[in-house]
Amino acid sequence: MENRMFRALAVLRVVLVANTVGLTVYRLDNFTHRGAGLALVGVMVVWTAVAIWAYDAPRRRVPALLVADLLIAFATLLSTPFVKGDGFNATVPGFWIAGALMAWAIHWRWVGALIAAGVLSATDLLIREQISQTNYGHVFLLMIAGPIVGYMCGSLQRMAAERDRAERAAAVAGERARLARAVHDGVLQVLALVQRKGPELGGEGVHLGRLAGEQEQALRSLIRQQDTLQTPASAASPEDSVADLGGALERLAARRPSSVSVVTPGVAVELTQRVVDELAAVVSACLDNVAVHVGEDAPAWVLLEDLGDKVVVSVRDEGPGIPPGRLDEAASSGRLGITESIRGRIADLGGGAELFSTPGTGTEWEFTVPRSDRSPLGSRS
């Protein structure tokens, strides 16, 4: 942010020095010592070029540079009575001194601007024989505008720093959420399966199941400690490639052909690869839940609907259903399957997930995902 401000100040310095040169040439008859006046303007031109170069690199913005900038502005003001003689109206540098004032405002905020404005204003008043209303107005403007600009610069820099911190935090949190989903889809499912099946093996299986249960709880506790803030779907960079969602769902059903039925439209439902991967992962998590909570051979149905501006995927089973409040209890105990693997993924895609379940009548998930501007329209006319 400070770099951009100093680049803007460089443009302002060029405008100010051009104004000073033009006024000097136009009012050269007002100079008692014309040669000294032109030499003084030459110094201002040279220092403008040096200042633009020096302020362009952060490593050169040392206190000595800003002090030198202010001292040169102070010296040009102080030399005005000698160059123009007594009774002058306008100083030699004129508005050129604002360059040093703005530099202090950008680098040292309103405190620096107030100090620089005080030095320049006092000098401008002390070198005059009489103080007119116009002179007072110029000084008043310096004393007010300088600190205000300094305060605004400080505010903008703080806002930029806070924005950068928020973006980094959101990126880290989003990565943690995706990692939690991946862990749940893989490691936690396997550990839970080992914990349930181990005792059935007897002997070492009992010990193995107990160890798997301990590791599962430890891993769930670790996941819960992570910040689950998710990044908006627009922050992710979708894949340019496309894929058929129907084909991806049918491949999932092929792993359990005797119990999972998939119904898709008669044509390909093409979406970006990222959307297809995420929806397939959501359906896979639902089918895993059916196998775990209802039975490995329990029937399940997957329905895909292409509604033009959105796609709807439904997953239904005929299990015992989910009691009211059970999902909240699972989330509070660290079981993030529904929160992360299912709802989290759908939220990342900008869609919605609805659960319809009554104890004894089965469970149905309905996932609605809008098509993004970059999502192809498949074979629809």
Image: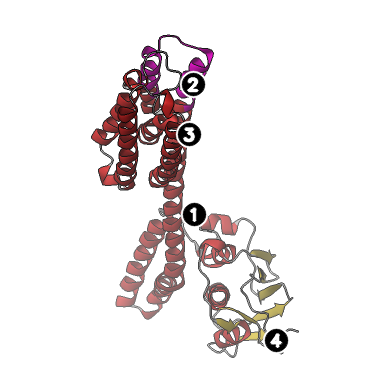
Give left or right: position of 203 versus 217. Answer: left
Mark on residue 229?
Answer: 1
| Cα distance between the residues tagged 3 and 1 | 31 Å
| Cα distance between the residues tagged 4 and 3 | 54 Å
Amino acid on which the number 2 mark rests in the picture = His
Q: Secondary structure at mark 2?
A: helix
Which is nearer the N-term, disc 4 or disc 3? 3
Give left or right: position of 348 versus 206. Answer: right
Amino acid on which the number 1 mark rests in the picture = Leu
Residue 377 inside the magenta-drawn segment: no
Mark on residue 379?
Answer: 4
Mark 1 surroundings within 10 Å by alpha-carbon count, few (fewer than 14), some (14 through 19), many (20 or more): some
Q: Which residue is mark 2?
A: 138
Residue 130 inside the magenta-drawn segment: yes
Foreground pick, 212 / 6 = 6
Residue 210: % across, % down: 35, 67
Which region shows up in magenta?
Answer: 117-145
Foreground pick, 353 / 98 = 98
Residue sitting at x 34%, y 28%: 34
Instruction: Work out which residue is located at the far front of the displayed protein and give it.
Output: 29
Mark on residue 152?
Answer: 3
Q: Secondary structure at mark 1?
A: loop
Which is nearer the N-term, disc 3 or disc 1? 3
Mark on residue 28?
Answer: none
Q: Secondary structure at mark 3?
A: helix
Which is nearer the N-term, disc 2 or disc 1? 2
